[in-house]
Amino acid sequence: MVASRNAPRSSALHERARAVLAGGVNSPVRAMRAIGRDPLFIARGAGAELVDSDGACYIDYVCSWGALIAGHAHPAVLEAVSAAAALGTTFGAPTEAEVALAEAVAERVPGVEMLRMTSSGTEAAMTAIRIARASTSRERIVKFAGAYHGHSDALLAAAGSGLATAGIPASLGVPPAVAASTIVVPWNDRDALAAATAGADLPAAIIAEPYPANMGLVAPQPGFLEFLRERADACGALLILDEVISGFRVARGGASERSGVSGDLVVLGKVLGGGLPAAAVGGSRALMELLAPVGEVYQAGTLSGNPLAVAAGLATLRLLDAAAYARLESATRALAEGIAAAAGGREVCVSWLPGLLTVFFCASPPRDFAAAARCDTAAFGAWCRALLERGVYPPPSQFEAWFPSLAHTDAQIERTIEAARGAFEAIA
């Protein structure tokens, strides 16, 4: 069954959900408000496809927001999770499998000698900030406008009106004093970063997505990641690379491997859990042993290192060999170039890396969040609605990345490009 404008079962479920779930969803972007429609409720997934509650089938480019690099219900992942579940779903105690996963991560990611697992990227980023503050005896954090590092108070800060300003709360409920300890600068702005990392009140850390994907995919300008490393070293701050999205996706060792720039701490998630809730912070032994029970930086989690998530993560990492990354890059390139060509005369920019892309409705590729925000998001929303009608499930916000997976076939990519062409024509 192909997609249609009407989804009566999803509509009915949405009404039920609104009565018992805040906003009818458990994460805001799922509400699809940014593209001007109600959410679709999903019944099942297999490979690169989703089926909604009304039986309509879609080629999926959300893939659980990047967690499913191998696609939905991959047999190897299902087998690993089933075997782990048969032994018990959680113990609240150490297991051999979590040691194996930590060893696998340390072998892959440059600069990571030790790991501390959590259940979400928010927890992992929060822990990284705590380690940075403890190790430097400083308080301020530098982040980039438009970057998302979870919803902890200190990192849920928006830019003020200057080029390098004390953050202002990006949400009700965030104390202004907490947000003010975060300095927000524009991405790719060397002068603003230099200003934020100079003077008497130096930061504990610079935190960055090396390939930002929460403002849409906005690539670093040549040499900018190296400049992050340089400024962190110059001012004695830690460089925290948030690789929740890019980790194990853009390369075997993530952005650290691809760019050659390593962080003092690395935040990981999504692919790490193979589709189950898992994240981690990693770094050198000296930094990681600041954490309790060795050191005095406290962090804990009942479900950290959950056996099912660890099993899914290990199974997924074993799938990611050189051939897998070559396939992922080839598929992403074909999709990105095909969508760009399908746009015809419309001003569209497609930014991409292996396993990541964003379609911006603008004349030139954005270099920071302000430029991304100036794109034609209304046209993007109309285009996404037209894609859904043609059986393609895109991320329902221009500020989120598409996630091609190893499960996407050449035929599905061609169908997506044809759907994109039809959607461009429909909104012309």
Image: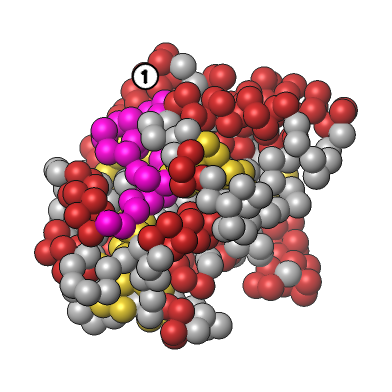
Is residue 245 one of those drawn in magenta?
yes
Is 18 displayed left or right of 169 in the figure?
right
Residue 231, placed above or below residue 77: below
The quadrant holding residue 413 is top left
Q: Residue at x 46, y 16 (%)?
A: 321
**Where's the N terminus, which quadrant?**
top right
Between 73 and 13, which is closer to the camera in this rendering?
73
Which residue occupies 27% across, 38% down?
261
The x and y percentages for residue 22 are: 69, 73
Q: Residues within 10 Å of mark 1 (few under 14, many from 20)?
A: few
Q: Mark 1 = which residue?
A: 326
Q: Which residues are magenta?
A: 236-265
Q: Is residue 58 visible?
A: no
Q: Mark 1 belongs to which amino acid?
A: Ala
The percent coordinates of residue 333 (x first, y second) are 30, 30
* Residue 229 visible (yes or no): yes
Q: Position of residue 91 (x, y in %)?
A: 83, 40
Vertical placement of 167 versus 203: above or below? below
For residue 409, above or below residue 369? above
